[in-house]
Image (cartoon, rainbow, N blue to C red):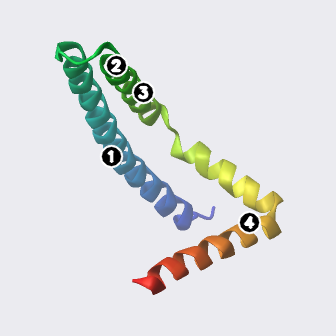
Amino acid sequence: MKINYWKADKAEETSAESTGFENVKTIIADKLHNAAEILGEKATNLDAPYGMAQYGKQASEWLDQSADYVRQFDYVQADNRVREYVGQRTGRSLLIAGGVGLIIGAILRRR
């Protein structure tokens, strides 16, 4: 019976990465939620015109929705979708990557 050590090592790496990524996701989601709460409180407590309070409430709701999205985001599924897309459309993916590289290079050259 042959043991594949590479797969075992890869599984341990994925588990460690997953835990680290989950921690980062939780921190970001908590910060977004806290910002939403603070903005919502300020929007209701301000003696600002009605329109400004409405904008504050709307921004607070968007931040809260963003926090929920971050909590539910599954990076493994996103990674699989990107890999599948690149595998199906290799030429287009290379052109996009090359274009992004040219843009970043042009921006960095100007500095």
N-terminal-most mark, 3 or 4 = 3
Badge number at residue 24: 1
* Residue 35, horizontal then vertical, whole percent: 25, 31
Classify mark 3: residues with Cα within 10 Å, few (<14), some (14-19) or many (20+): some
Vertical order, 10 against 32 (above or below): below
Classify mark 2: residues with Cα within 10 Å, few (<14), some (14-19) or many (20+): many
The residue positioned 68% from the left and 48% from the top of the image is 81
Q: Is residue 40 left or right of residue 3?
A: left
Q: Is residue 45 left or right of residue 30?
A: left
Between the residue at mark 1 and the residue at mark 4, the CA separation in whole angstroms equals 28 Å
Q: Amino acid at mark 4?
A: Ser
Between the residue at mark 3 and the residue at mark 2, the CA separation in whole angstroms equals 9 Å
In the image, 46 versus 105, the foreground residue is 46
The residue positioned 43% from the left and 36% from the top of the image is 70
Q: Amino acid at mark 1?
A: Val
* Residue 79, horizontal then vertical, whole percent: 60, 52
Q: Which residue is mark 4?
A: 93
Q: Which residue is mark 3?
A: 62
